[in-house]
Image: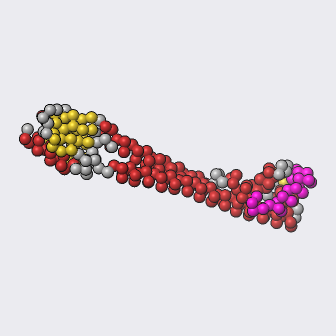
């Protein structure tokens, strides 16, 4: 407008700082999620490895003190027995007849099974444990925390991006004839001074201009008090 006199111009708060804080918080939460998942994975490997080691020791003791057929019939439900048999393609089957267990396997398989169990190494136990690392309740618990942390981290980063994009164009300019500028998301505002009924502060850096058409709100104005005073002064002079 011609012959307008500039009274005051707004200064935007440091929204980059808030975006940075949200982004850093998001990265930390995502890193925590990855850490929790890795911790859960390796803790479960250790859990299964220790369990298999205990089972294998018991089976080998029975093989040495009795025989492989007895050991198999006693430990037929043990996970480590099944794992060794499956990996080495040993046909181990336990059949039930009345109250007695009958082991239906051939002698070659009994011999192979006994040999494999005696030679079972720490590395073998770890390999078997990796197959089961995702199945324990402990892993599920850690995984839930990991997923929650991951989602929270992503939300923080997205919130930081949206916050910055929605606030970066906010501005208020006051002249003796009008108030104009941009609200959140760059929405244009044009208010003739004759339409202003009142102006007030809101929150830490916000202001509200009451007009005949309703309230117009601005946020993140660093020199909010200066803008409020300028509008009030023009409103009174009018």
Q: In x, y percent, where is residue 166?
A: 34, 41
Query: Above or below — where is 198 with respect to 17?
Result: above
Is 166 displayed left or right of 136 in the figure?
left
Q: Write the residue at 82% across / 60% down.
A: 117
Task: Report the coloring of the rendering.
Answer: secondary structure
Q: Which residue occupies 19% across, 38% down?
A: 179
Residue extending furthest toward the right: 107
Magenta region, main secondary structure: helix
Side of 186 relative to 111 (left or right) = left
Image quadrant of residue 126?
Answer: bottom right
Q: Position of residue 177 (x, y in %)?
A: 13, 36
- 186 or 87, nearer to the observer: 186
Location of the C terminus by quadrant is top left
What segment is highlighted magenta in the picture?
Answer: 103-124
Residue 90 located left or right of residue 165: right
Q: Is 9 included in the stretch rendered in magenta?
A: no
């Amino acid at each position: 407008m011609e012959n307008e006199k500039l009274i005051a111009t707004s200064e935007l708060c440091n929204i980059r700082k808030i975006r940075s804080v949200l982004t850093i918080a998001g990265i930390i939460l995502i890193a925590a999620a990855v850490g929790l998942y890795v911790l859960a994975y390796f803790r479960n490997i250790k859990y299964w490895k220790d369990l298999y080691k205990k089972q294998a020791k018991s089976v080998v003791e029975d093989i040495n003190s009795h025989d492989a057929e007895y050991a198999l019939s006693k430990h037929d439900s043990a996970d480590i027995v099944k794992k060794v048999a499956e990996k080495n393609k040993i046909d181990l089957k336990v059949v039930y007849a009345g109250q007695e267990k009958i082991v239906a396997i051939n002698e070659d398989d009994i011999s192979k099974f006994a040999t494999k169990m005696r030679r079972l190494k720490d590395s073998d136990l770890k390999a078997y444990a990796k197959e089961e690392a995702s199945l324990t309740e402990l892993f599920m618990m850690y995984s839930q925390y990991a997923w929650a942390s991951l989602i929270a981290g992503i939300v923080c980063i997205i919130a930081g991006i949206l916050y910055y994009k929605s606030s970066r164009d906010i501005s208020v300019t006051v002249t003796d004839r009008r108030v104009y500028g941009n609200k959140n998301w760059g929405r244009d505002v044009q208010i003739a001074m004759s339409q202003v009924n009142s102006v007030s502060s809101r929150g830490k850096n916000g202001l509200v201009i009451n007009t005949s058409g309703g309230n117009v709100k601005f946020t993140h104005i660093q020199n909010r008090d200066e803008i409020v005073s300028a509008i009030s002064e023009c409103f009174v002079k009018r």
